[in-house]
Image (tube, rainbow, N blue to C red):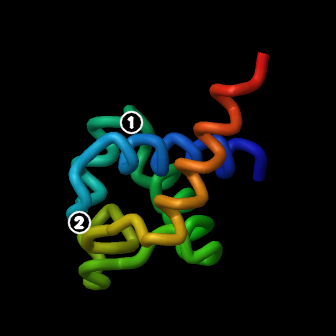
Amino acid sequence: MEQVEENANKVMLALLGTEMRPYSGEELTMELEMSPQELNSAVDLLRDQAMLTLADEAPREPYAFGTVLITEKGRKTFLTLKSDTSCQV
């Protein structure tokens, strides 16, 4: 589970640094250099936490989704965590 959480954090950080639009599994896999299976697990976890939503639910093999979009909750949560972490010495 620890690796899934680490991958989920990578997904969120990648989405925070980009424009707010839907991203495909292929785009995220290339950006993050993770396998489709790792990405699918991370997306599942983030969806369960309401950090991501599926903009297109139709699966695009080998991904279990079409495109994902960061939610407002996800953006606020990770921006807060990011700023809290950067303030620590």
Q: Which residue lies most toward the top here?
A: 89
Under mark 2, the amino acid is Pro
Instruction: Residue 19 in the image: state x and y as whole percent.
Output: 22, 51
Under mark 1, the amino acid is Leu
| Residue at mark 1 | 32
For the C terminus, give its image quadrant. top right
- Residue 3 image-quadrant placement: top right
Residue at x 47% of width, y 59% of height: 75
Q: Secondary structure at mark 1?
A: helix
| Image position of 4 with respect to 51: above or below | above
| Image position of 56 with respect to 79: above or below | below
Residue 18 horizontal side relative to residue 42, left or right: left
Between discs 2 and 1, the one toward the N terminus: 2
Instruction: Residue 77 in the image: state x and y as whole percent.
Output: 60, 59
Q: Secondary structure at mark 2?
A: loop
User: Which mark, residue 89?
Assistant: none
Residue at x 27% of width, y 69% of height: 67
| Residue at mark 2 | 22
Q: Nearer the viewer, residue 62 or 22?
A: 22
